[in-house]
Image: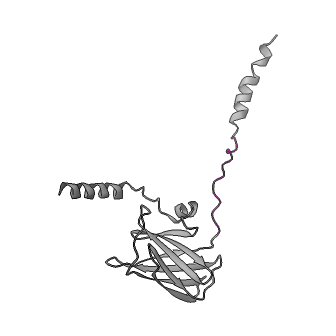
Amino acid sequence: MNKSMATVLIGATLAVSLPAGAHTEEYFDSITAPHGGQMRMAGPYHLELVTKENEIVLYVTDHADIKINTEGGVGKAAFQVGKAKPKASIKLEPGGDNTLKGSGDFSVTPETVVIVFVKLPDQEAQSTRFTPLKPKPKTKSTKPAKKTGAENESAGEHGGHHHHDH
């Protein structure tokens, strides 16, 4: 009993200690996804969408990036360009481990939005939107920021001392 209570308390502590706002699209776009796809949050899941020619793979993990078994789960990916109605939708089925997979005739452009629906056993259905080929945001460069006149001040302070050298 004590052991299970400790587990519950540790789990609750971990859930509370996750930084709020760490799972925004900007956050996911700033990191490299484990399988090279695009990551989004959907309810209790982190979903990573990987599209290849006529194949789609969805990796499902929890917020700690621990794999969630997708056995018995179902999903759907709907492809939409702009405001048009989704052109194609592909059924996603368990692909082993923590994946849902599907294949079909689809194309992905930078304007393509993929709306993914996921339903795992004994869980509520979740959905999220991906833009797999959306240009990556410009990451903050590692070059030092331009100095904002601070060096001029110090030059001025030091420059004022040389007239004392008689």
Q: Position of residue 106 (x, y in %)?
A: 60, 86
Q: Quadrant of residue 108?
A: bottom right
Q: Position of residue 131 (x, y in %)?
A: 58, 74
Left or right, 92 with reference to 51: left
Q: Which residues are magenta?
A: 135-147
Residue at the right extreme? 166
Q: Is the C terminus in the top left, top right, bottom left or bottom right quadrant?
A: top right
Left or right, 158 with reference to 95: right
Residue 51, above or below 18: below
119 drawn magenta: no
Image point 37% across, 54% down: which residue? Answer: 17
Q: Identify which residue, 6 or 125, lies in the foreground.
A: 6
Residue at the left extreme? 1
Dominant SS of magenta comes to loop
Image point 67% across, 44% down: which residue? Answer: 144
Q: Position of residue 45 (x, y in %)?
A: 42, 69
138 drawn magenta: yes
Image point 55% across, 68% down: which residue? Answer: 35
